[in-house]
Image (tube, helix red, strand yellow):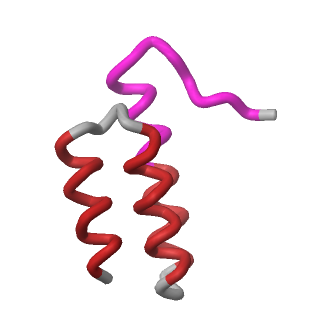
Amino acid sequence: MAGALAAEAMVRDRPLCEEGWRLLALAHWAGGRRADALAALRRRARSCATNSAATPHRP
């Protein structure tokens, strides 16, 4: 849980930092919170679309 809180703070301070989002999703996943991990990745996609002209790549 501490890892998720630290990653959440990183995301809040630097929403365009991909590493923070990755750490947040991994922390939730490792803690057994799969839905929260997926929600974090979705939040990251929305944040990216809102804060830049770039859109997340879909293979």
Is residue 59 placed above or below 31 in the rendered structure? above
In magenta segment, residue 54: yes
Quadrant of residue 16 in the image? top left
Q: Report the span colored magenta.
A: 43-58
Quadrant of residue 46 in the image? top left
Residue 27 placement (x, y as % from top left) = 45, 72
At x 32%, y 83%, the residue is 1
Q: Nearer the viewer, residue 14 or 40?
A: 14
Q: Nearer the viewer, residue 8 or 58?
A: 8
In magenta segment, residue 25: no
Quadrant of residue 55 in the image? top right
Residue 26 placement (x, y as % from top left) = 52, 67
Is residue 9 placed above or below 57 in the rendered structure? below
Residue 15 placement (x, y as % from top left) = 29, 38
45 left or right of 5 in image: right
Quarter of the picture containing the C terminus is top right
At x 33%, y 73%, the residue is 3
Is residue 55 placed above or below 53 in the rendered structure? below
